Structure formats: C-alpha cells, structure tokens
Amino acid sequence: MPTLLARYRLDAPRRLPPLAAWKRSVREAVTAVDEDTLAPSAAKNAHYLSFRSTRGMPFYLKRRYTWFVNYGRSVKTRLRCATSALEIDNGRRSGVISRDDRLCPCCPLQETETERHFMLDCPLYSNDRLTFTDAVDDLVLRNDPFGWRTMSWNQRYQFLLRDGPPEGTPITALQQWCRIQIHLYWFLAQAYKARDAYVRDY
Ligand SMILES: [Zn+2]
C-alpha cells in the first residue's frame, strides 16, 4: 500500500476521509500518473504538476456539490491532467505528431486546441465565459483577497486550475475562493456540453 501511494504521490490519510472525496482524489492522481506511463510525455506531467501545489487531497476536491457543478469540477480535473476531449489530447492519441496541427474544430482561429484555448480564448464559449467572468468581477468588487483584478490572464488561468488557496488562508478568503470556483465549474460544464454538441452536429 505505501508503495502504491508513493507511486501516485498520495499521502496516506491520517483518518479516513469521506469515501467519495478520497475516490476523486485517487482518480485524479492515478489518471495523471498512468496516462503519463501509457503515453510517456514529460510535457503532460509538467502540465499537471504546474497546477499541483499541495500533497494529499487537493482542496478543490474536498467539497460536495450538485451533479452539474460536480460535472464542471470533473472537467477541471480533466484539464489539469491533460486527459480532456480536446484536440491537444485527441491528436496525441490519433498520431497527429505536431502540436501545431491539433487545431480547434470549434472555431475559425486556427489555433491549437489547448486547455487554455478552451478555457480562455475559443469564441464558441464566449457568452458562457462572459457570464462567468462578469460573475467573478462582481464577486471581487468588494472582496478581492487573491488580487483577481490585477492578475494577467495567464495568472488567472493558473489560479483557477490550481489545487486551492495555500494553507492558513483566512476563512473569508476561502469562502470567496469557493464561490469563484463554483462559477468556474458552472462555466466549464456549460462549455464542455457546448463543445460536445458542436462536434457531434458539425
Ligand atoms: Zn476554438
């Protein structure tokens, strides 16, 4: 067991966490490591590790939500692990060697469909994205403990996909972080659904 846990960079839980939460955490870690073993790619592992700041269960996986918000959160996990349905990953499996040729099928921008393109740039989701960023702008108007308003889009991308706020973050800031994440999960769920429908119909 300890060997297994070490292989997936998981800490042994000190007391038994709620089963569903523990399962989510294990699934995320196993996906990240095994996908990497099956298709060895330093880039993929580095991608995952760029969002991973803590050991044990990432903070964002600890809470329970309704199924649609949960679905959005599972999209976040897929984006973190680079095991999404996006072309950047499809191309890896179907043998499109060059990253630059894994173009987004949902828009005319002729850009590689990366996690970042999906989340921040693809015009197919601009309405949902705008609803999301408006909601966050509204939230941080009076309370901006993480400095959202002064972040670059790169920093926002990192901030949104990371584990969660550092340990010792005051409770009011934690609550604010959770509110922002719920808006994010909602957006990701909508966008993923829209992508699915688009790819199916065209
Ligand atoms: Zn696109």
Image: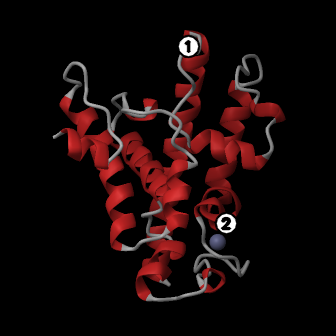
Residue farthest along the right direction in this orientation: 150
How far, Cα to Cα, is label 2 from label 1?
36 Å
Q: Quadrant of residue 152?
A: top right
**Where is residue 93 shown, x and y percent of the image?**
41, 81
Which of these two is toward me, 40 or 105?
A: 40
In the rendered image, the vertical position of residue 77 relative to residue 60, given as above or below: below
- The residue wearing badge 2 is 122
Horizontal and vertical percent for residue 5? 26, 42
Label whose residue precedes the other's in the sequence (2 or 1): 2
Q: Give the number of the mark in front: 2 or 1.
A: 1
Q: Amino acid at mark 2?
A: Cys
Identify the residue at image location x=59%, y=10%.
Answer: 170
Give the amino acid at mark 1: Gly
Residue 117, compared with residue 65, is above or below; it is: below
Is residue 132 at least partly visible in the picture?
Answer: no
Confirm or reject: label 2 Cβ below 8 Å from ligand 1. yes
- Numbered mark located on residue 168 in the image: 1
Residue at the far front in the pictured view: 3
Which image quadrant is residue 131 in? top right
- The yes-or-no answer for disc 1 within 8 Å of ligand 1 is no
Kindly identify the residue that appears in the image at 44 percent across and 53 percent down.
75
The reply to whether callout 2 and callout 1 are in contact (CB within 8 Å) is: no
Residue 167: where, in percent of width, then height?
53, 19
Circle 2 residues within 10 Å: few <14, some 14–19, many ≥20: many
Instruction: State left or right for residue 124 relative to residue 187.
Output: right
Q: Where in the figure is residue 141, as x and y percent of width and height?
A: 77, 23
Taking the image as shown, residue 53 lies to the left or right of residue 1, namely right
Q: Dot 2: what SS?
A: loop
